[in-house]
Amino acid sequence: MNIPDDAFYALLTQALQRRAEETLQRTLYHALRQAILKGTLHPQCRLPGSRTIAQQLHLSRNTVNAALEQLTTEGFLLRDRQGSQVAALPQATVSSPDSHPVIGLSPHLNLLPPGTRRDSPTLAFTPGMPAVNYFPLPLWRRLLDRVLREEGSMLLGYGDSAGEPSLRVAIARHLALSRGINCDASQIVITEGAREGLNLCTQLLSERGQLAWLEDPGYFGARSAFIAAGLAFRGLPVDEEGMCFQTMDVSAPRLIFASPSHQFPLGTLMSATRRLALLEFARKAKAWIIEDDYDSEFRYSGVPIPAMLGMVPDAPVVYLGTFSKTLFPSLRIGFMVMPKALAASVQPAIESLLRGGHRAEQRALALFIEEGHYARHLASMRRLYRKRQTQLRAALKEELTVPHQVSAGEGGMHLTVKIAEIDDGAVVDLARQYQMAPAALSRFYLDPACGETGLVLGYGNTSASGFASGIRVLNRLIAQTRPGRG
Amino acid sequence: MNIPDDAFYALLTQALQRRAEETLQRTLYHALRQAILKGTLHPQCRLPGSRTIAQQLHLSRNTVNAALEQLTTEGFLLRDRQGSQVAALPQATVSSPDSHPVIGLSPHLNLLPPGTRRDSPTLAFTPGMPAVNYFPLPLWRRLLDRVLREEGSMLLGYGDSAGEPSLRVAIARHLALSRGINCDASQIVITEGAREGLNLCTQLLSERGQLAWLEDPGYFGARSAFIAAGLAFRGLPVDEEGMCFQTMDVSAPRLIFASPSHQFPLGTLMSATRRLALLEFARKAKAWIIEDDYDSEFRYSGVPIPAMLGMVPDAPVVYLGTFSKTLFPSLRIGFMVMPKALAASVQPAIESLLRGGHRAEQRALALFIEEGHYARHLASMRRLYRKRQTQLRAALKEELTVPHQVSAGEGGMHLTVKIAEIDDGAVVDLARQYQMAPAALSRFYLDPACGETGLVLGYGNTSASGFASGIRVLNRLIAQTRPGRG
């Protein structure tokens, strides 16, 4: 079973000649290992003694011994007094180049809605993208560095599963003032943005196969989360008072996902009547409302609308907030607020499911809030976005000649323009050539073929100076893609 | 239905007197809203005109009008020519103080293993906690700040769902050299540590109700992930060659979770024979191996053992790596490496499921690797941990007088000491009073009552100067808690 000496040394010499950044010992080790795995060195094949190998290859004996020892530790070689012998390894796996490794991906993956393309934040009209160039980055850098300098290596461990206590306290204070939510830090869990909050809700509050309601059209992160959790889901239409639901519905949902303060994408504010009715329904149906409050800090008439969570005592509501829109998306910090009793019940599960971390960023954000920078930044963004919304409405009036209707929206960072009978997907695809990334309204419907068509225009990241020319281009693209009118 | 004037003004005057940080307008708004929700102001109740209210309360008419308008927008008031009228809201929810909001938590939550307590990183002997005080934090701060300064607001958007391309390239290069894995950036997905990688594996590769194998004893993050995904699971014993499995097993698993390079917690290195057999079995059973490579960079004899992923072509293996152990836990950056064909198939799902983000941290880490700091830090930690392991073994020999056996471990940052017939949970609880946080070995078994007992002693975060005195205390605690020997 032995290999001829010259074949053996030729093999190793070649490997040593091809050696790039590796040490001699590792090169030797890899070459022998590869030869054993490939079967070039057969099981039970005896290797020459380490002294001989060293002499032949002009290597030190230590180098050779180290490589042989490593292979012995791993079970590729057996060493005895006579030297080294190749171990008898199972051979079948060694080569099966035709076996395709992609076996049985989960079928539910096919149901997932397509992800959003994550381009540069500078593409005009991107929905959900805030004015990141107005974010006080030098200040943020200072706070982050201050935290890392002052706290040092104490911040490098895992930290609290629910997130940094100082950040949770700061958020609780902010929510009381701005969102009418009276809560304390124990009711708050820091998440990786609203999306992780949604996943947590499905894990904590639902079982596979149960029913979830969501708004149609709506945020498709909710759909992905429900699909991933194996929930059945049903889209509910949205009218001018918000999500429409029938309390007589045969099968009651377990989860109800809604964005009452500023429906995405239509911009509707859910009326007080509808809110109270939904709360009452949820209580009776033993369902949980997941209140997505993604951009309600930006409200341009009156004060921000208080959240459903704070509306009645013990509302069966889990509130999801995020800093992706108010600060910047790559921060990936969001939070979930639960009623007190729920927070206490799920605490052990939170400790088992979440790992904490990102402590420096969370501490820096706590300082950002506590020192008043957050409130200041919000106020300044509110002014900026209010002005931009007015300017965008003006540009639409001026430049959009196709029949259209601007959907209600007193706040936020986007306007939804309904335009009947267009291929909005095609318009959006063409728009990218002009450095514009509005979204197609039909895409937010569970069945895009049955949804209304139009454009969702974000103005968070787009300077008003580009509105008129941008809308003019979109107007032309719309005309081009309308088959009957070309 | 009207409210008497004096009751109405008394209500508002009280609210205005109690006003803390709010504006007059918001105080008025909240007081009216609360009165409507509570039913103090009945449906259809007519309010006085805004001019009258303003005069009575000594407020400006603008303030009153703004509050009334906000309530009208939200649907609490109806305004007509005669003034404002309270809307007819559903009343039932308004007060139901006895309804308990914690309804139907997911029953599977009860199955979750308890989370690890996340104390200060300075508690002695904490398993899995690296020497964070040796991490070059000033250098890290410089790199992070450099990235934020140079890239500026471009880094504030979402970024690539699979993580920063520059970091994936750097990881691919590092893996080729240190772990024998030849892959490119397209096969790598950046995750929030190994735990998110595990959750992704269950989502992508399994369906609820399928079977997963895991090591018993083993990492309980795997158990949590499988429970959360609704998988059935079975623990497989671990012998001196690694996980023991029967290929004749009646029901084949879908996922196999293993830590072949350094079994957690026993420290076993899976032999080459066992690895090849497991690969072959997985291929035939159409199962995926999830290879947890949590600390194999720290290997003290020979070079680090190459991963199973790189062992044979197209191995049905998903590899999970993390920087939590090699750098610091709160960084929360890990990664998943997939075979090429799998990576291509799951790309759309990754885009739908993941949101990217943490771009500055990922870019800083890419620089840290590319500029050679990572390799240097690894080498220096390897020296430190090797020395500490030797010193801890010596301290155990010297100070641990109860019969015990130190489990195999050529690397890593912990030693597992088997000690028969002790209440290891009680020892661990007592040890916390002495600022020590070793883990109880029995806790890592699926059924702690049937597992071996002993202590898992981390030395990553513990200076050798404390070993002797620490082990002496533990020795005393063990003696105290042995019922028959007190």
Image (spheres, coloured by chain):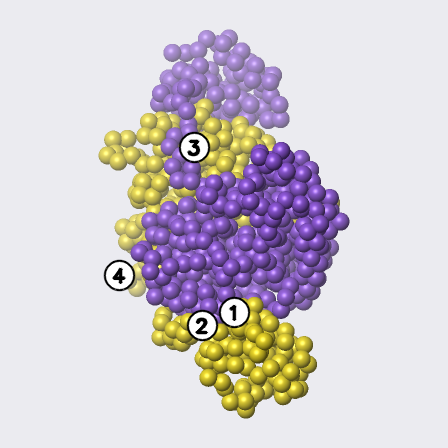
Chain colours: A purple, B yellow
Q: Chain of mark 1?
A: B
Q: Nearer the viewer, mark 3 or mark 2?
A: 2
Place of residue A164 in the rendered image (x, y in percent of width and height, measured from the top left): 55, 61
Amino acid under label 3? Val
Residue B179 seen:
no
Q: Which mark is residue B89?
A: 2
Task: Count residues near mark 3 (Cα–Cα under 10 Å), then give few for <14, some for 14-19, many for 20+.
Answer: many
Q: Which mark is first along the chain, 3 or 1?
A: 1
Instruction: Determine whether B462 is above or below A347 in the image.
Output: above
- Answer whether labels 1 and 2 touch (C-beta < 8 Å): yes
Q: Which mark is residue A321?
A: none
Amino acid under label 1? Gly
**Residue farthest toward the bottom in the current orientation of the protein:** B6
Task: Count residues near mark 1 (Cα–Cα under 10 Å), then give few for <14, some for 14-19, many for 20+.
Answer: many
Foreground of the two, A204 or A266? A266
Q: Which mark is residue B484?
A: 4
Amino acid under label 2? Leu
Q: Nearer the viewer, mark 4 or mark 2?
A: 2
> What residue would you read off at disc 1?
B75
At mark 4, the secondary structure is helix
Task: Count residues near mark 4 (Cα–Cα under 10 Å), then give few for <14, some for 14-19, many for 20+.
Answer: few
The answer to which image quadrant residue B238 occupies is top left
> What residue would you read off at disc 3?
B317
At mark 2, the secondary structure is loop
Instruction: Determine whether A103 is above or below B90 in the image.
Output: above
